[in-house]
Structure formats: C-alpha cells, structure tokens
Amino acid sequence: MKKVVFLVLSVLVAFQTHAGLVTNQVLNRVMEANANGETPVVILDLDDTLFDSRTRKAIIFREYAFYLLNEDRDESIAFKIFSLPLNQYHYGVSETLHSAGIRTSDIHEEINNFWKERFFTNEYAALDLEIPGAADFVQTLKSYGAKIVYLTGRDTPGMRKGTLKSLERRGFPSDILITKPTFEMDDTQFKKEAFEEIKKMGEIVAVFENEPRNLNAMIEAFPRAQAVFLDTLHSDKPDLPSESADHISDYL
C-alpha cells in the first residue's frame, strides 16, 4: 500500500509545473508561519507580476491605430499595429514599434506621447488583465491566512482608483495596497521606504517582483523570505535578479 501511495505522489509531482512547485512552497511557508503563531505576509508587485501590462499597451496602441485611420493617415502603419500579436509587445514603446516593423522617427515620438497620456491613468489601469493563474493564487494565499500586501510603483493620484477597480474586477482579494505618493518618485526608493512599515505587519514569508532591482532590494530587506522573480517584462535597468530567487512566468 505504501508503495502505491509513493508511486501516486511521484506521478503527481512529475506532472506539476515549476510554477506550481514554487507557489506550493510559498503556501507551505504561510502555513508554517501560522503554526508558529506569526502573521504571514506576502508582498506582491502589480505590473508584470500580477497584471500583464502588455494588454494595456495593446489597447492604447490599437486606439492610436484607429486614430490614424480616422485622420486618413498612415494606413499601412495602422494595419501593422493591428496585426502585432501580444507576445511582440515589449517594455519600451520603441522596441514594440520595431517589432511591428515601424521605424519612422516622427511616428515613434507621436505614439510615445499618445501612450504616456493614457498608460499611467486610472481609466486604463482598470482595463488590466491578470497574468494566468495570478488571482486564484492570491485568493489561495488569503484563504491560507496570509496578509496580502500589494506594493506597486503606480502613483496614488493617477492610478490608485483604477488599480483598486482592476483588482476587484479580476478577482484579487481586497487587502493592503501601497501606492507611490507622486508619479515622479523613484520606484525602488519608494519601495525601500515602504519596507519599514511592512516589517511591522508580520513575518514576511515571500516576495514577488518582476523588476530585478526591486527584487534584490526586497531580498536584502527580507533575507528569510522566499523571493520569486516574474520573468515577464521589465525595464532596461542593468540589474540581474539574485541567484537565490525562483523564476516563474505565470502561476499555473
């Protein structure tokens, strides 16, 4: 009988994804903290950690393509944007346009301004779609007794209301959302300052982040926490994620 049980468990482990193994480790840490009488805290970034920012970019780019058609301008560029698949959207606007084969400099400047006016707003933040499995995972964390802290570089004046709406729409549990007081504040510096307040909330068992620089700052601040790097999109800042971090690209 024991041999049969062992074989069944071996098969289940063999079919479990790497992301599944990592998220299960985090859940185990949550349970251990609870068993020790501590409040388990999990810190999660939002853009390209829980939400796929490419969907917001694609909406804005296609809105620009419609603008070109309505103005009877650059039909060929509009159709290049319409035909661009989601996996060809990059962190930067210029890199995305190059993927579409659009290299005209004045169009780059125009669409970059069009994008900036919309991307960092409540209206467009509310349209975000989750990275596959993200909402279910965070709901499971919450059901296991974890305190959820959403720590994001999104700013309070421009994006907080839309972010709260997006979290609700996509089924993420309502917990603690920490946003920047101003748009101009450096993301990493803001997060480092927030760490001191978060430390008071309980035992930090895990941190999730897509920006290597921010993740490395979390590892330094919370050395006992499990660090998870979302290998999705990130800025061109030169940092590499610490070798101690687990890598996943979704939560399935």
Image (cartoon, rainbow, N blue to C red):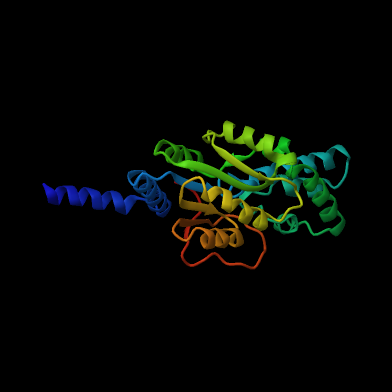
Q: Position of residue 194 (x, y in %)?
A: 61, 51
Camera-side residue of 193 and 240: 193
Q: From this viewpoint, is residue 165 visible?
A: yes
* 156 to the left or right of 3: right
Camera-side residue of 210 and 68: 210
Q: From this viewpoint, is residue 90 visible?
A: no
Residue in the picture at 53% in, 59% down: 221
Q: Position of residue 17 (x, y in %)?
A: 39, 52
Residue in the picture at 82% in, 55% down: 108
Q: Is residue 106 above or below residue 146?
A: below
Camera-side residue of 163 and 191: 191
Total numbered circles: 0
* 28 to the left or right of 204: left
Q: Position of residue 25 (x, y in %)?
A: 38, 52
* 38 to the left or right of 240: left
Q: Residue furthest front?
A: 200
Q: Quadrant of residue 93?
A: bottom right
Q: Quadrant of residue 214?
A: bottom right
Q: Position of residue 23 (x, y in %)?
A: 42, 49
Q: Residue furthest left?
A: 1
* 138 to the left or right of 233: left
